[in-house]
Image: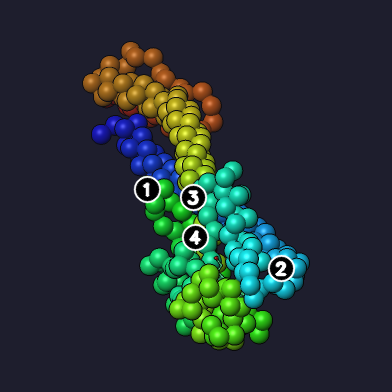
Amino acid sequence: MGLRLKYNIVLILACTIGIGAATGMSYWIVQKSAIEEVHREIGLLRANATAVRSYTLNSIDPLLSDDSDILFLPESITSYAARTVFAIFRQQFPQYSYKEAALNPTNPADLPNALEEDLIKQFRADQSLDQLSAIVEEDGERILTVAFPITIEQEGCLRCHSNPEIAPPAMVDLYGSENGFGWELGETVGAQFISAPMALVDERSQETSLILSSALVIAFLLVLIVTNIMLSRIVLRPVARMSQVAEQVSLGDFSVPEYAKPGKDEISSLSLSFNRMRRSLESAMRMIDD
Ligand code: HEC
């Protein structure tokens, strides 16, 4: 195996491993920062839903609750308002979703699916958790869902969620007396679930790794070409010339011209030493002949 082939095999192997590792690492880093970005988006959506909730509780509910014995308006309910506002937002951004699910919900539409139920149970088991997230695949698309626990912190909530007998009668007429009751102060009854698509994240990670790996491949090809030219000029060609001269001299042909590689590197000094050795050999041979 020639020197050039050996050198190229080692270089290609090292560069392939290096490019592979760098591409994988960049994919991982970009994915990580992009997931953080989706988390930030979800945080903004949650802050907005919380604002809608508090506006409904503090500004709308007091205006509408006077008639609650005869007429119950779900519009005055925080979770109803948050869900309805989000539904309007979704008309422009259908990839995002918002849900307030409870294990025993007032509105059956708020029943959790298997994943949501699992997350609510985790919150109930560990009160110190302030959020949980999961990446699920739906119709071939990856979706990041972040859950935030809903804990009954105000006495006021129990007016409608503890006992159907003390709840507004019009509400019980509308929702029935079976669901959404029996909640207790300090209990984590459910969670807010906000989902955002990962498609942009995945696209960006793939794009960045593709750009990085292409740049590395181009840099590697440049290194390969330049080092091959240098190897040929500095080492391979002079060594081939010297070995050709040595071959002829070894066969007793001293007529070949001397070869001295210009420059001050090791190969140049080898060519000079070789020429000196050749001259000594030539004069030794001449002395023997005489
Ligand atoms: C005036 C009665 C009333 C009060 C007070 C009230 N809720 Fe509700 N709550 C409801 C009704 C009715 C629904 C169902 C709304 C709908 O149709 O989505 C509901 C829904 C919810 C839901 C969604 C799950 C479900 O049960 O469908 C959560 C979570 C919730 N309430 C938590 C709270 C918390 C926390 C408080 C106190 C800050 C509170 N509620 C105060 C009446 C009330």
C-alpha separation, residue under disc 3 versus residue under disc 2: 40 Å
Asked if ligand 1 lies within 8 A of label 2, the reply is no
The residue identified by callout 4 is: 145
The residue at the far front in this view is 70
Label 2 CA crowd tier, 10 Å (few <14, some 14–19, many 20+): some
Q: Which mark is residue 64?
A: 2
Residue 170 in the image, given as x and y percentages of width and height: 59, 73
Identify the secondary structure beneath mark 2. Answer: helix
What's under tag 3, amino acid-wise? Met
- Could you tell whether 224 is left or right of 78 in the image? left
The residue identified by callout 3 is: 198
Label 1 with label 2: CB-CB less than 8 Å? no
What's under tag 4, amino acid-wise? Thr
Residue 184 in the image, given as x and y percentages of width and height: 55, 86
Tell me if residue 195 can be seen: yes
Label 1 CA crowd tier, 10 Å (few <14, some 14–19, many 20+): few
Of marks 4 and 2, the one in the foreground? 2
